[in-house]
Image: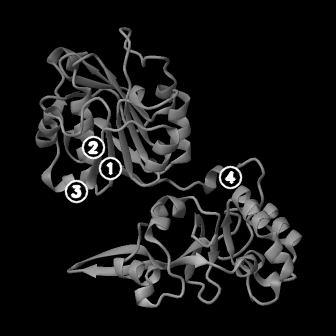
């Protein structure tokens, strides 16, 4: 679910004027969304099991790690509708490393009546322990025991009812235990063309003839996902964000109500920057992949694996043989491969979620009806 932080909460927690116990500079939490998605560890709150504490890598001016306290599934009503969010109710640099060490230990420190650790990045946690070992040892806490607990902790190895799940070192599970994933469909002809999609490792590769309408099709796909309420980042690396062509495509293909759901940039980025962008958005669209800094084709699959719930759409330049320039590795990794032929007729050469017999006219924005001869065949 989305994570929100009310502006009032941020003001109260950061400002001395509000007599905060832990005032901090707002610049120190600029990368908070990324830090939340890439934490050191996640704990149950010590005094309230319905709340969650995230230990982040963000460091305050006094050298302390920031923690976020979340209220899960907070309901907020707006008129007749309701939205459900995870709400950050507190944010501050945790000055007591000993207290955090007790969270790692849970009931083994004899001051807490249950285990609190729910998820951990072991490499980051070992570094945190090493950096704070002197404080932990001074408090006569078993530092070696903390590191051993982290080493042996199995993320996701506890079921919702608290029972221990069987350990499987090779990642296997019984086929019958795999539940059918939830799938979605875009509206209109573009949805009929693409078929279903799911929010798990879904990506689209776009290629085509020169001037066939690849960018036009990308705008239409972006608009369709924005219409589903998905926050979208568009890296327009072939055309300047403020160009007349971009503005024309925006007017022609983007619904006015979707404009606030789409962020655009014409600045090229490297892999680490693109990876960070993927963690902030539901959909990331790139025109085109070759304009990114220092990227290789293998990075496309790597990016998807590191951001499995982000939909990635990328235009790749194609050769005269109608294959991706530089190799076809992204085509094997993508869930859908679309080629746009001269004249603006798009075809799915590969689609894991639908048949590939439909054609889409990019300029007319609709499915192309088959000719009578094709129907007879």
Q: In the rendered structure, find residue 174 and report the number of the disc placed on it.
A: 4
Q: Read off the residue under disc 1.
A: 232
Q: Is residue 287 above or below residue 106?
A: above
Residue displayed at 57% across by 58% down: 38
How many other residues sit within 10 Å of disc 1, few (<14), some (14-19) or many (≥20)? many
Q: Earlier in the sequence, mark 3 or mark 2?
A: 2
Which picture quadrant has residue 195? Answer: top left
Q: How many marks?
A: 4
Quarter of the rendering occupied by the C terminus: top left
SS class of the residue under badge 2? helix
SS class of the residue under badge 4? loop
Q: Read off the residue under disc 3.
A: 260
| Residue 287 or residue 157, whichever sits in front | 287
Residue displayed at 11% across by 42% down: 251
| Residue 223 or residue 199, whichever sits in front | 223
Q: Can residue 248 be seen from the camera position used here?
A: yes
Viewer-nearest of discs 4 and 2: 2
Q: Read off the residue under disc 2.
A: 222
Q: Is residue 298 above or below residue 135?
A: above
How many other residues sit within 10 Å of disc 2, few (<14), some (14-19) or many (≥20)? many
Q: Earlier in the sequence, mark 2 or mark 1?
A: 2
Which picture quadrant has residue 140? Answer: bottom right
Q: In the rendered structure, find residue 43 and report the number of the disc placed on it.
A: none
| Residue 290 or residue 92, whichever sits in front | 92
Q: Can residue 350 be seen from the camera position used here?
A: no
């Amino acid at each position: 679910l989305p994570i929100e932080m009310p502006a009032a909460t941020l003001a109260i927690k950061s400002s001395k004027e509000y007599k905060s116990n832990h005032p901090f500079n707002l610049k120190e939490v600029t990368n908070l969304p990324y830090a939340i998605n890439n934490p050191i560890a996640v704990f149950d709150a010590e005094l309230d099991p319905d709340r969650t504490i995230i230990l982040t890598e963000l460091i305050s001016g006094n050298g302390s790690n920031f923690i976020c306290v979340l209220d899960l599934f907070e309901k907020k009503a707006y008129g007749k509708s309701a939205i459900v969010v995870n709400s950050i109710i507190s944010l501050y640099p945790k000055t007591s490393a000993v207290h955090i060490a007790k969270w790692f230990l849970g009931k083994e420190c004899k001051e807490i009546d249950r285990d609190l650790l729910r998820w951990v990045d072991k490499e980051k946690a070992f570094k945190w322990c090493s950096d704070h070992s002197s404080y932990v040892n001074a408090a006569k806490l078993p530092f070696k025991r903390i590191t051993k607990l982290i080493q042996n902790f199995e993320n996701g190895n506890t079921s919702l009812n608290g029972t221990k799940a069987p350990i499987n070192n090779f990642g296997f599970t019984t086929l019958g235990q795999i539940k059918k994933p939830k799938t979605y469909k875009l509206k209109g002809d573009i949805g009929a063309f693409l078929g279903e999609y799911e929010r798990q490792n879904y990506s689209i590769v776009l290629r085509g003839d020169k001037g066939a309408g690849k960018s036009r099709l990308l705008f239409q796909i972006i608009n369709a996902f924005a219409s589903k309420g998905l926050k979208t980042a568009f890296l327009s690396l072939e055309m300047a964000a403020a160009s007349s062509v971009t503005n024309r495509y925006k007017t022609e293909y983007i619904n006015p109500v979707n404009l606030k759901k789409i962020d655009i940039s014409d600045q090229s980025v490297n892999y680490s920057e693109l990876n960070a962008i993927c963690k902030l958005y539901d959909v990331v669209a790139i025109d085109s992949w070759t304009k990114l800094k220092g990227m290789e084709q293998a990075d496309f699959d790597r990016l998807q694996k590191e951001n499995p719930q982000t939909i990635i759409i990328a235009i790749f330049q194609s050769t005269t043989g109608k294959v991706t320039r530089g190799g076809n590795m992204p085509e094997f990794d993508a869930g859908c491969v679309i080629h746009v032929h001269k004249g603006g007729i798009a075809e799915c050469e590969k689609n894991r979620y639908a048949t590939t017999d439909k054609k889409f006219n990019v300029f007319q924005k609709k499915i192309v009806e088959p000719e009578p001869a094709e129907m007879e065949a």
